[in-house]
Image: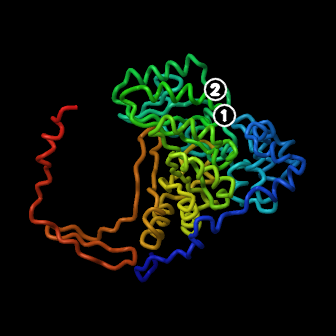
Amino acid sequence: MDSSGQVPVVPAAGPSKARAGRAPGSAEGRKRLFPHATDAEWGDWRWQQRHAVRNLEQLERYVSLTASERAGVQETASLFRIGISPYYLSLIDPEHPFCPVRMQSIPVREEARIRPGELADPLGEDKTRPEEAIVHKYPDRVLFLALDTCSVYCRHCTRRRITKGGEAELSKEQMRRGIEYIRNHPEVRDVLVSGGDPFLLSDTRLEELLAPLHEIPHVEMIRIGTRVPVCLPMRVTDSLARTLRRYAPLYVVTHFNHPKEITPEASEACERLVDHGIPVENQTVLMRQLNSDARIIQELNHALLRIRVRPYYLHQMDVAEGCEHLRTPIAKGVEILQQLRGYTTGLAVPHLAVDLPGGGGKVTLQPDYVVERGERETIFRNFKGQQYAYPEPQEVDCSCPYDEVWRSRPR
């Protein structure tokens, strides 16, 4: 809000037709970096995994690194993996160190520093980890950690203590124990499968996890957290989509952070899932100098909605070790929501979430639109800063008399 009480208008993010405004695909970068890859190879997610860039020598073949990037790769080598799929590498701007794809995949020197307040386990998951595969922090849902590998190791990773390597794919015994834990806890109705990236499991291996979870009577829904549609979209095959559909209700939660990532390939992956009846939601992490501007978030969320992906969370970055250089002040996220609200559809305005350090769980923030509360009315300001009165009702009994009848019905 400026000095006049008005909220600045965010410039329009572009056309809204279904396939308009998409970022260029990987073709130009592929031609420049991998000219000998055939179409069959490029479209094979296993080929992409085998040819991922995993060390400094490989990276310098493809990108002219800055001094900070070179030092970052060297100084973080023992702290956290590097891994970039050829597809995601092809999206990097070779000329600009602030390219959002580059910032998410290539470390810089600051990542090797641990600042006060940063934590190895920023969400306090390990203290609520009764089994190797299970984090049970919330009453009715659990996190199922399926593996420790990713197609791209994001430099803002909150779970780098796991994805740094050393745990690998769960053994069959660990998976069995995790499933048995859920079976023995009837309060669990929601299972979020994550890791690492569960979509790096083969269809068969993924089904070995989903099938027994789906059979547990009290498990009402399964969610899968994955960045594959962003970083390795060729993994989203018709076979994978059909496998997921068999275990509905199942939701895919993905992780686009910048409109540059919404390429034709990524769009096709998301639309394939939706076409097979798999809802897709997006959680964006707010990162300083990468997407810390309302115009960028608006463009991203409009692009997501055009491919039928629902913007869900805008995450304040967790206090993971080595990530402070990417964190924004809390006030920036609130400011972004204020600049979006009223100037675009509500579907394009995500929840701003802060996962409290040490295991406090998620809380959400939003701009405060209440000016004054009274017994007879509440005074609000709208998105333009104008004030409106909402009259409070005279009757205030909010009990629900029919609920006793509803709850006692035969089941």
Name which quarter of the figure residue 149 lies in: top right
Amino acid carrying mark 2 in the image: Glu
Q: Earlier in the sequence, mark 1 or mark 2?
A: 1
Name which quarter of the figure residue 300 lies in: bottom right
- In the rendered image, the quadrant that contains the C terminus is top left
* Contact between labelled residues 2 and 1, with CB atoms less than 8 Å apart: yes
Q: Image check: 336 left or right of 77?
A: left
Secondary element under disc 2, as helix, strand or loop, is: loop
- In the rendered image, the quadrant that contains the N terminus is bottom left
> Looking at the image, is 107 positioned above or below residue 293?
above
Q: Nearer the viewer, residue 293 or 278?
A: 278
Amino acid carrying mark 1 in the image: Thr
The number of numbered badges drawn on the structure is: 2
> Looking at the image, is 92 positioned above or below residue 82?
below
Residue 70: where, in percent of width, then height? Answer: 81, 48
Residue drawn at (61%, 36%), measured in percent from left and top?
196
Residue 315: where, in percent of width, then height? Answer: 51, 52
Q: Image check: 6 left or right of 33?
A: left
Residue that label 1 marks: 149
Question: Colour mode?
Answer: rainbow
Q: Nearer the viewer, residue 298 or 207?
A: 207
Residue that label 2 marks: 169
